[in-house]
Amino acid sequence: MIDPTEENEQKKFLRSIFLNIFIEVFIIISYVYFSEAFGSISTFFIESRSFSIQFGITLFFFSFFSILGGASHGLISGFLSEFLFEFVYYERIYFEWCLVVAIFGFLCGLYRYKPLKYHEGMKVYYTFLALIITSFIIMGIIIWFQFLFYPSQDNIENVVINYGFKFLIQALISIIFLVPIFLIIYDKVFASEKKSLYYLLLTHHPISASDHTFYLEFGRTKIFFCSRCSGVIIGGLVTLFTTHILENIYNTEFSGEIALILCIVLPIPGLIDWGTQRLLLRKSTTESRIFTGFIIGAALHLMSYTYRYYLYTLLLLTIYFTIFGLLIYFGHKKEMKLLKAEFEEYSTQEEIEE
């Protein structure tokens, strides 16, 4: 028999792994999409080597997410985000800028957000001061990297103005004042009081079946979500991002044939996991629900590439929904049979007692 304490520790460990991966993926996807629309942190320096004043939207959001996520997330996601963006959209990899973004994320994350932190005025001032110090450090690193990676570059005056001072001004108008304001708002909204938000619209399960849900914690606010449905949404978004990146790298649309094969295969584990639970043969776990939901979400997105095989896709949907309906029907029958048996046993016991 499993010790309840050991089981809870295992659940906490698995939840920690999931949340850390989720944070990394969220920051990377956000960074790449913001960079596509507004330019990455490196764009304003690589595409224009002269001094100009820019509001860095990507710089702002990345520093905000790094403070919320912490130093390790800022470091890892910063490097991977910039590397991925450069790999897809630049002609070559500017390794020095991958390091700059990684170090910037790490330094921002050192003064990590904690609930109720910004209810104190001095903590806001410390964040402001930390961002100024971080900006000066990154300014120095950018100047140093320019001479380290490009020793035959312009004179020191041009490098200081067009790279170092340019970043400092961009940081001044993009993050030094705005990020603390947004952190105050975030803290007021999510950390003013300790609360749990459990809505059937998000969970699809009553509180008695809360083991079918998981929660994300923002400040001191826990928001509960249906495990499998959340997996479906996350899987769909990650697959959307992945196919978008691959299409940009190879300049071609994702194969309809491969998409169709994946649409046939990927939903099977989810049907097995949900179906065996519905038939009361076993009880699925939060981890299995999220995972199977994830791959179902991937299949749902890939279905958009099967338009040339719409008849096969229609047939596939019909088969899966038929299986789904049959599982609901037989699962309901089995539940009613068990309830009837319990009721008869209870009635018999009452008669004996009388």
Image (cartoon, grey):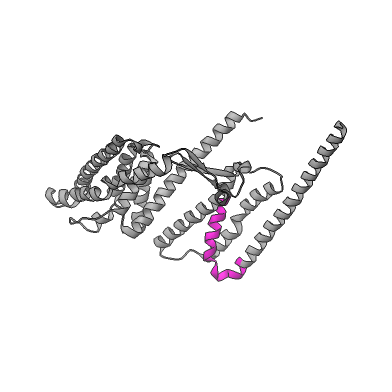
Residue shown at 61% from the left, 30% from the top:
4
User: Residue 120's image quarter?
Assistant: top left
Q: Quadrant of the N terminus?
A: top right
Residue 34 visible? The answer is yes
Q: Is residue 312 magenta?
A: yes
**At 71% from the left edge and 45% from the top edge, which residue is drawn?**
280
In the image, the segment drawn in magenta is 292-313
Give the x, y percent position of residue 308: 55, 71
Instruction: Tell me residue 106's x, y (percent).
Output: 33, 40
Above or below 114: residue 308: below
Vertical order, 96 against 354 (above or below): below
From where the camera sits, is residue 75 visible? Answer: no
**Residue 299 highlighted magenta (yes or no):** yes
Percent across and percent down for residue 232 are 54, 53
Q: Is residue 253 left or right of residue 96?
A: right
List x then y, in percent, for residue 101: 31, 46
**In the figure, residue 92 lies in which quadrant?**
bottom left
Q: Is residue 45 left or right of residue 201?
A: left
